[in-house]
Image (cartoon, rainbow, N blue to C red):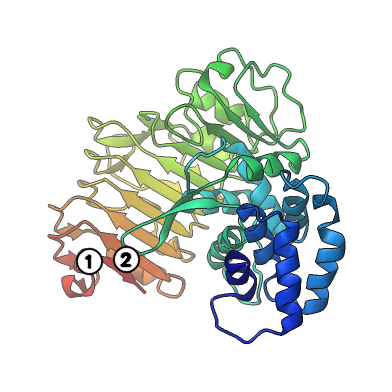
């Protein structure tokens, strides 16, 4: 009863009527004292009045009487009472293997890239809505085994067997997780996770796929250098919305990537020896829908280059989130010929090397997005003296700084 009370009444010590306590005790007994079932039911009934509790006891738990070991009816009932956008976010998790450790930030970014997140309240940002979606699914026991950082913030979670089965049941064929040959892949599949060996001979005829998730060892959105040239992948799968090339040892970007008109999330990176990522054609790259860009693992890179001249020739007018991670020699931020175009930037996060003392041109970006920027996070740069544009060391001290 203690578990049920905590989930259904909350942490507040309130006086509850004898009737609500009695109904709660009957619900616990009907759940055969199954801890997961009790948590699911308790979180589902949180904030509901006694009439809803009684109705759930009489009707909602009717199917549970016959099989106390099978809590699927309770899980499905909890799922069906979610808001439609949150249902989409949960079903998307069927792409991940059971008990896979899912990064919270990556998961929310994938939801955003697919366009699943809709504000729950007037004036709520998409980013805040994503955080609330995650919290709702966690509270309703769709996620378990959360890991937190030293500040108490959630880093990752898992989906256990039973909840994973629910996610698979409700995908309606649009999500497929394959570990064997996928020559018979259904045309209605839009999101696909795979074991690398299963893609050895696949021809990528399904041009409507929006997500590729590699579940072999280290998880990546797309990690297919040995299976298919990136340029060919881009040419075929023009509906891609999430693309991570950070582990592909990319040396140059093709202008054909500009054909990914729906791309909203992109990660870039290179090996420890590369000093730049080059733009391979004369044409500039346009990403009209790109909202999130990650630059990761570029320990020798100072920027992007074209024809030997360091210029930014990548147009990102809708960019909302920029993450720079492990790029200690990146002395300037090569986003656009006109940095003032970054008027939609919502989040800027920089994690470099302890030896970095300054970040050139950062002030230009801060000035251009002063009305939209809500979060500036700078960490692991303990020798940072100056943020160009007037922000001094006293404002960040190598730790997270929020604006």
Report whether residue 115 is seen.
no
Q: Which picture quadrant has residue 87?
A: bottom right
Image x and y of residue 71, in percent:
72, 48
Residue that appears at 64% across and 15% down: 181
In the picture of the structure, the residue carrying the numbered disc 1 is 388
Is the residue under label 1 in contact with that under label 2 (CB below 8 Å)? yes
The C terminus, quarter of image:
bottom left
Which residue lies at the image location 45% right of the left edge and 63% below the top edge? 345
- Give the crowd class for mark 1: few <14, some 14-19, many >=20 residues within 10 Å: some
Q: On the picture, is 151 further left or further right than 170?
A: left
Distance of mark 2 from mark 1, alpha carbons?
Answer: 8 Å
Where residue 97 sits: x, y (%)? Answer: 56, 35
Lower position in the chain sequence, tag 2 or tag 1: 2
Identify the disc placed on residue 364: 2
Q: Is residue 132 above or below residue 143?
A: below
* Percent of width and height locating residue 373: 42, 70
**SS under mark 1:** loop
Left or right for 336, reference 182: left
At horizontal 43% and vertical 71% (from top left) the residue drawn is 374
In the foreground, 278 or 176: 176
User: Residue extending furthest top?
Assistant: 201
Compared with residue 180, is residue 76 higher up or lower down, i.e. above or below? below
The answer, for residue 32, to whether it is visible in the render is yes
Q: Is residue 368 above or below residue 115?
A: below
Label at residue 331: none
Closer to the camera, 387 or 374? 374
**Residue 323, position as x, y percentages in the image:** 37, 53
The N terminus appears in which quarter of the rendering? bottom right
Per the image, label 2 sits on a secondary structure element best described as: helix
């Amino acid at each position: 009863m203690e578990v049920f009370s905590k989930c259904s009444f909350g942490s507040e010590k309130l006086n509850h009527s004898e009737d609500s306590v009695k109904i709660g005790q009957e619900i616990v007994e009907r759940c055969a004292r199954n801890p997961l079932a009790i948590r699911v039911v308790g979180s589902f009934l949180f904030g509901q009045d006694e009439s809803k509790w009684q109705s759930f006891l009489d009707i909602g738990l009717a199917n549970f009487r016959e099989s106390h070991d099978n809590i699927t009816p309770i899980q499905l009932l909890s799922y069906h009472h979610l808001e439609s956008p949150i249902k989409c976010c949960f079903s998307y998790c069927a792409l991940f293997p059971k008990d896979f450790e899912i990064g919270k930030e990556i998961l929310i970014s994938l939801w955003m890239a697919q366009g699943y997140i809709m504000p729950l309240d007037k004036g709520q940002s998409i980013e805040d809505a994503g955080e609330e979606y995650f919290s709702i699914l966690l509270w309703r026991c769709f996620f378990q085994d959360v890991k937190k950082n030293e500040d108490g913030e959630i880093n990752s979670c898992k989906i256990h067997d039973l909840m994973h089965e629910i996610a698979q049941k409700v995908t309606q064929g649009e999500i497929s997780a394959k570990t064997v040959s996928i020559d018979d892949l259904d045309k209605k599949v839009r999101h696909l996770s795979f074991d690398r060996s299963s893609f050895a001979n696949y021809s990528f005829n399904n041009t409507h796929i929006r997500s590729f998730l590699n579940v072999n060892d280290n998880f990546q959105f797309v990690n297919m250098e040995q299976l298919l040239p990136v340029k060919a992948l881009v040419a075929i799968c023009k509906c891609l919305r999430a693309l991570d090339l950070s582990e592909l040892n990319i040396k140059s970007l093709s202008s054909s990537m500009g054909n990914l008109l729906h791309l909203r999330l992109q990660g870039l990176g290179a090996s420890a020896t590369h000093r730049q990522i080059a733009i391979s054609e004369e044409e500039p790259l346009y990403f009209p829908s790109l909202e999130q860009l990650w630059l990761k693992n570029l320990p020798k890179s100072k920027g992007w280059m074209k024809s030997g001249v360091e210029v930014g020739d990548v147009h990102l007018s809708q960019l909302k989130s920029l993450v720079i991670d492990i790029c200690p020699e990146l002395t300037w931020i090569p986003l656009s010929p006109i940095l003032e175009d970054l008027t939609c930037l919502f989040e800027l996060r920089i994690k470099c090397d302890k030896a970095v003392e300054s970040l050139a041109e950062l002030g230009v970006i801060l000035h251009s997005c002063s009305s939209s920027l809500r979060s500036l996070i700078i960490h692991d740069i303990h020798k940072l003296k100056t943020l160009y544009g007037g922000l001094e060391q006293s404002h960040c001290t190598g730790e997270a700084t929020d604006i």
